[in-house]
Amino acid sequence: MRIREATSHQDLDEVTRIQREVWNVADIDIAGRIQLRASQHAGGSVLIAEADDGVMAGFAYAFPAGEHGEAFWHSDMLAVRPAFRGGRVGQALKWAQREHALRKGIRRITWTFDPMQAGNANLNLELLGASSREYLSDFYGVTSSDLHHGLPTDRLLASWDLESPRVVALARGDERAPVKADLTVSIPPAWNELVRQEPERARDEQGRVERELKAAFSSGLVITGFDKATTSYILTREHP
């Protein structure tokens, strides 16, 4: 698998096709070639992963952002085609994104993720070493994607400190040291199945997680890990 920056209009059009395949969204919810190219030119990045036969397996898209005088990247999308899942393509794209950002002088990357998806939580918090202290209610509104089930698009904002000791250690391949939790917040272990089989219960669970995490953040806690065994967020008083 080779990872490189998208360099042609054809590359960017293929990124657009992957969005349709992975998220099954209408055109109104897709970032097209014009937006992607403009973001690249403005200092962002569109990384693509290619198999040996040249087929694009996935992509990671980040655009320049700024807040309180800090320049950083917001990684708006990461997608891997179904045929290439399970091969750590998503992880490889994120670590390549980190290296690309550092070369451009960027020290932090943010992105949003669905707090109800255990797999995404584990990737972002445990395998990459990001943290979160902000809950965004219905951030994108109801979208055309089947993956969102017509529910409010609640999101956690992940913050990835690219040079923190934890992230540097994970980038080297070190195992992460256990984190002692001050509080845990559980999520359903199989969210998509729950939504399909018990939609009303799923709505209740989404509301419970929103309330518990917002209350935790208001008290000064930060999400710093995820326990796969119990599908629970690990919250601590201080960022490790």
Image: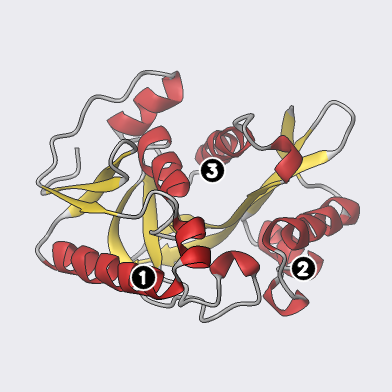
Question: What kind of element bears circle 2?
Answer: loop
Q: Nearer the viewer, residue 170 or 62?
A: 170
Alpha-carbon span between mark 2 and mark 3: 22 Å
Spatial distance from mark 2 to mark 1, Cα to Cα?
A: 36 Å
Q: Amino acid at mark 1?
A: Arg
Could you tell me the amino acid type at mark 2?
Answer: Gly
| Residue at position x 12%, y 60% in the image | 220
Q: Residue at x 59, y 32 (%)?
A: 92
Q: Name the front one of labels 1 and 3.
A: 1
Q: Label 1 neighbourhood size at 10 Å, few (<14), some (14-19), many (20+)?
A: few
Would you call the spot at circle 2 few (<14 residues within 10 Å), some (14-19), or many (20 or more)? some
Residue at screen point 51% across, 81% down: 141
Q: Where is residue 10 drawn, in percent x and y? A: 90, 53
Residue 203 vs residue 45, the one in the foreground = 203
Residue on which the image places disc 2? 32
Q: Nearer the viewer, residue 27 or 116?
A: 116
Quadrant of residue 96 within the rendered picture: top right
Quarter in which the N terminus is drawn: top right
**Which numbered disc covers residue 151?**
none
**Which comes before the other along the chain, label 2 or label 3?**
2
**Which circle's residue, 2 or 1, is located before the other in the chain?**
2
Q: Which residue is mark 3?
A: 101
Residue 35, horizontal then vertical, whole percent: 72, 69
Q: Amino acid at mark 3?
A: Ala
Residue 75 falls in image quadrant: bottom right
| Vertical comparison of 92 with 199: above or below | above
